[in-house]
Amino acid sequence: MTAFAVPTSWIFWAQEQAVELDRGLAVRWGLWLVVGFLAVFPGIVAYMVLLERKAAARFQDRIGPNRVGPLGLLQPIADALKLLTKEDLVPRGADALVHLAAPVLVIVSAFLMLAVIPFAVGMAPVDLPSGVLYLIAASSLSPLGVFLAGWSSRNKYSLLGAMRAVAQLVSYEIPQVLSVIPIVLWGGGLSLVAIFDKQADYGWFIASPPGLLAFLILLVASIAELNRAPFDIPEAESEIVAGFHTEYSGMRFSLFFLAEYLSVFAVGCLATALFLGGGMPIPFARFPLNLLDGSLARLVVVDLILLAVFAAKVFSFVLLMIWIRATLLRLRVDRLMNFAWKYLTPLAIVNILVAGIWYECVIRPGALTLGRWLGGTLVTGPMVAGLVWLAFWVNRREWAGEAAGPGRPSLEGARPDWETPGQTGASPQRAH
Amino acid sequence: MGSDIPLSWFLLFAAATFAIGIIGVITRKNPIAVLMAIEIMLSAANVNLVAFWRYGPERLDSGPIAGIVLAIMVITVAAAEVAVGIGLVILCYRRWQAADVDRYDSMAG
Amino acid sequence: MARILFLVIAGVGLTSALSTVLSRNLVRAAVSLAGFFFTVACLFILLEAEFLAALQVLIYVGAVSILLMFGIMLTRGVQGTDLVSGPSAARLPGIVVGLVVFAVLGYAIFEEKGLRTQYSWGALDERTAIARGSKEPGSPLRSAVNNMGKVVGVELMTRYVIAFELAGLLLTAALVGAVAVAHREEDETRSTGSGVPPEKPEPTADKPNP
């Protein structure tokens, strides 16, 4: 069967380019673009900022913004207006074009991530066959934007922040990607919709020992990817002013700000879709999905349930990140790198094998039963626990406060190598 | 307008970018610029591979995605090449204190 | 429609490739290179290989460009201005060689005759149609396009398993080689078990000197 022997015609082309010619799809995409990406998501982000300020204030025994509107609810609007009316400064000697392009790149990366998340039945903006890979690719654009922002500002602190940021982002991207691989394995494909369906049948993926470990790795790596405390050395205020966005002001700065919180939201959506069963309220039941019978009214009801649960899960995830940010201290640079390369990456790699065992125990035999789930948990649970213990045991010397890596100030001469780590009695935050 | 993109357009694009890559490899002196030009050439080859895969006849004896797999292999090799290449460039920079391929002449006859 | 799209993408791609090669500022060249990689990903989407497009963005834009910029930062002044590529003797011959290569390739593209048993692809204007989303079973090519990730995985593990293993070997060798090559000599005595990957030769220790 050769290509030129096929009678090519308009009809074939029309079928082939269904995406282009289907009116309904075009309308749907337009709606997503206008309503979702221009109105809803930025609105969510604005109120997430308010949430973070309020929550952080509570953690620090303050009240938080409460002046604008009732309970401070109009604060985001006031902030946005303030940022919009601020003067937009470009430093002399900055590379103007790149300086402009960098925040755009970062925010485009954050928006692109949202384009494949299945929020509810039939409510994924796009169902790509290789959705997970697309997500990873879209999120890998942001280090480039961050680096360019720091470089084009022509400011030492910016450049330092950018170099730190890129080193950190590239390092933590690896465990982040590797922690998603078990989900792809269990979901039997890269499509997020397929993964959602699989979780309807086999329970949330977090409800398994390897899934839990993968979720934790993803959580830690995502916080690092988002430059949030305790991984915020790229924008550590006490060291390098504000890192890569030191020289940004006005609307351009708010683009970075928007991108950061949009990424937090996107990562919350990602974790919810991949690990927390999307919008399903009960871990091992097909609860809202079994109401579907093809009628529109049922679909609307089911979608409303799914959306509400999805939003609640994302909200809890974001709250967890705010909690972590308000609680933990900033890591030192070398510890940060070591944590990615010596703990998270090996754990994520070995976790893939454990995920394979789980697949053989639970998913391959067919329908999910309590016995299979218990068996799988009994087999993989000790393995996961052992792995985590092993990762910390192998790195125990470092954990005890030994200076790590060449070029770091260390007490090498004063303290012999064979001294037991316990004697130094150092906590991980000792040298902070 | 309205019909499909001809295969030759993809091939022309690939040829043009390949030529640009060659110009870069020959005229640039900075080793990293040379690396970039090599990457352009490899990408041009990839465009060709995928275009032939998509337009060519379907051959069952070589699998449904021969071109894609070949392109993935090229990407792999390119990534490895950049990793080693950057390492070599940094080493050369340390040794000669210059980023200029014309100065790296210790093996010149 | 598709043709216009192609022309726009190809125009952007050629422009960014040219500016990569011609730009005096290395960081700008790397930015253009990222743009070029992105247009190549767009072309892959036009060729219905979304999987490969995502891979291209992930590896080239996300990793290779960043790696190149790190290389620039470690070897040049921070602003990335390329001081050495002034007017060089090789410039004219280089451009001539490039043009000649392009002419030869273009001639080959349009004058290709094809063997007797095969068809000529010089005039191939249409591709085999692939109806997406329809339920009827299609050709292997069609199922491959519609579920690329899975097919790539299966093929890499069955038909191309040797190539896959060799690629893994190559990557391991490149990893070890890059670490060995770029490692600082004064660190040699203390370097046992350092897990720093080749992508970032001591990212924290090597602050760029402005």
Image (cartoon, coloured by chain):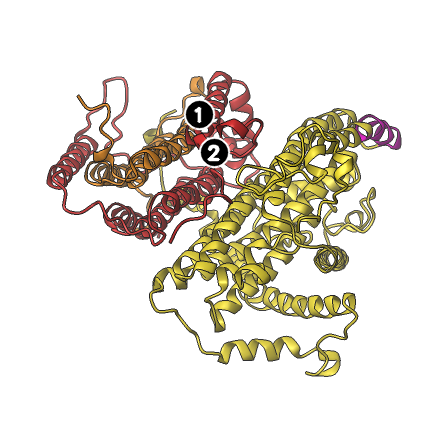
Chain colours: A yellow, B orange, C red
Examine the residues drawn in magenta and state their main secondary structure. Answer: helix
Q: Nearer the viewer, residue A290 or C205?
A: C205
Nearer to the camera, C61 or A274: C61
The residue where tag 2 is placed is C198
| Magenta-colored stretch includes residue C110 | no
Mark 1: which secondary structure? helix
Mark 1 touching mark 2, by CB under 8 A?
A: yes
Residue C131's mark? none
Give the crowd class for mark 1: few <14, some 14-19, many >=20 residues within 10 Å.
some
Distance from the alpha carbon under mark 1 to that under mark 2: 8 Å
Q: Is residue A112 visible?
A: yes
Answer left or right for A235 relative to A103.
right
Residue A298 in view, yes or no: no
User: Considering depth in this image, is A18 or C104 the residue closer to the camera?
Assistant: C104
Three-letter code for the amino acid on which mark 1 is drawn: Gly
Find residue A265 and report its image quarter.
bottom right
Residue of label 1: C177
- Percent x, y of residue C132: 50, 41
Work out whether B52 lies above or below A140. Answer: above
Q: Is residue A224 above or below residue A206?
A: below
Q: Residue shown at 72%/49% (left/top)? A: A278
Chain holding disc 1: C
Q: Which residues are magenta?
A: A369-381
Quadrant hosting residue A32: bottom right
Q: Chain of mark 2?
A: C
- Is residue A377 inside the magenta stretch? yes
x, y percent for residue C161: 51, 18
Estimate how packed mark 2 is, as few (under 14), some (14 to 19) or many (20 or more) residues with alpha carbons within 10 Å.
many
Q: Quadrant of the N terminus of chain A?
A: top left
Amino acid type at circle 2 is Pro
Give x and y (percent) for residue C86.
17, 47
Earlier-in-chain disc, 1 versus 2: 1
